Amino acid sequence: MKAVLKEIHYWYEQGYSSILATVVKTEGSSPRELGAAMAIRNDGQVAGSISGGCIEAAVIEEALMIMNENRDEQKSKLITYGAIDEFSWDVGLTCGGSIWVFLETIEPPILEALNQLTEEPFAICTRIDKSNSTKILITSQGVVSGSLDSSRLEKLIVEQLLNLPDWELVGLKNYQGVEVFVHCFARAPHLIIFGAVDFTRSLCKIAKMLNYQVTICDSRSKLLTPERFPEADVLIGGDSPTKYMKEAEVNSRTAIAVLTHDPKFDVPILLAAISTNAGYIGAMGSRKATVERIERLKDAGLSQQEIARIKAPIGLDIGARNPDETAISIMAEIIAQKANRQGGSLSFSDGNIRPRSLQEQKSHAR
């Protein structure tokens, strides 16, 4: 969504008009997640995607009709696409589910507010119960841009979002009878890597592809250089990586990978990491080194439950041989941990392919 909104702003500066199409609700299997977005320019150019290709052409056609037939009016439209059978020529989803797509134009004040944002969390809230959509952008500091045509509604939403601990919420919400699609954009997840080794370069590259902020820590200044790790956001040198671990801002969106291969470094770092609420902690090492490390952690006072938080040997068992393959196995395990999955082959499982959204989880639990 972020990239699509940036593209809309770029088109706006070039003088083009455009429509934003967003998946605001799903039922059953769906090709894309809530919040998936596609932008359609008035000359037919497209950015982003909202399905596996089954409904894009129909959405583009709808968007062009809105722009070409209502040039002077801001219009919006909610469209439902359901399943189709093998003999149908109708537009629909081959996966058997249903999705609701909201089409709208984005007003200049919202685009300008988006362009001024830095790395702070923010949310875009869209009222979809009106033929002319209204929208607000809320930053984590409580700054509001745009309007929902209701100060009471805006106050309710701002209060809810400012109380979210991690700014992770995507879904269609009902505020006293008014439907609003809320899409939060949290700060980028953070990967902290200890050890400026060969595997670190590969892990840094893969993590950046997945939009992680990457910090690399190592006391060996000759190894920890921008030339060796050009993709890294932050390089932390000095005599005590453990000190950084104790002082770093760590939350559930933080992943910690200890690749040092040296007990005098990795044990103190892991002891400090365990005291945080990091979403993932992993440590590299052979089976033998892992067993020896566990004994050292026990001697240092960690319980079996605390030690179990550490993924070691680090990464999923995919037969990785070189640094690039190992980096993929580590990031795959981080993704699986976040989604509460085991990381096995999909062909041997029968659950949902994608994790349920927060909205779907709550609905399923009731």
Image (tube, rainbow, N blue to C red):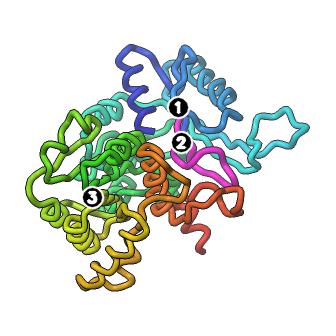
Q: Which amino acid does label 1 sit on?
A: Gly
Element on which disc 1 rests? strand
Instruction: Single out the mark in the foreground, 3 or 1.
Output: 3
Residue underneath mark 2:
36
> For residue 81: magenta?
no
Could you tell me which residue is drawn at 39 percent across and 55 percent down?
Answer: 153
Question: Left or right: 43 with respect to 11?
Answer: right
Element on which disc 2 rests? loop
Q: How crowded is mark 1: few (under 14 residues within 10 Å), some or many (20 or more)?
A: some
Residue underneath mark 1:
48
> Does the rendering let one see residue 147?
no
Q: How crowded is mark 3: few (under 14 residues within 10 Å), some or many (20 or more)?
A: many
Could you tell me which residue is drawn at 44 percent across and 40 percent down?
Answer: 134
| Residue furthest to the front | 288
Could you tell me which residue is drawn at 60 percent across and 41 percent down?
Answer: 101
Residue 353 vertical placement versus 111 (above, below): below
Instruction: Single out the mark in the foreground, 2 or 3.
Output: 3
Residue underneath mark 3:
260
Q: What residue type is labelled 2?
A: Ala
Locate the N terminus by quadrant: top left
Q: Between marks 2 and 1, how big is the CA–CA gap?
A: 8 Å
Which badge, 2 or 1, is on the more N-terminal residue? 2
Region in magenta: 23-38
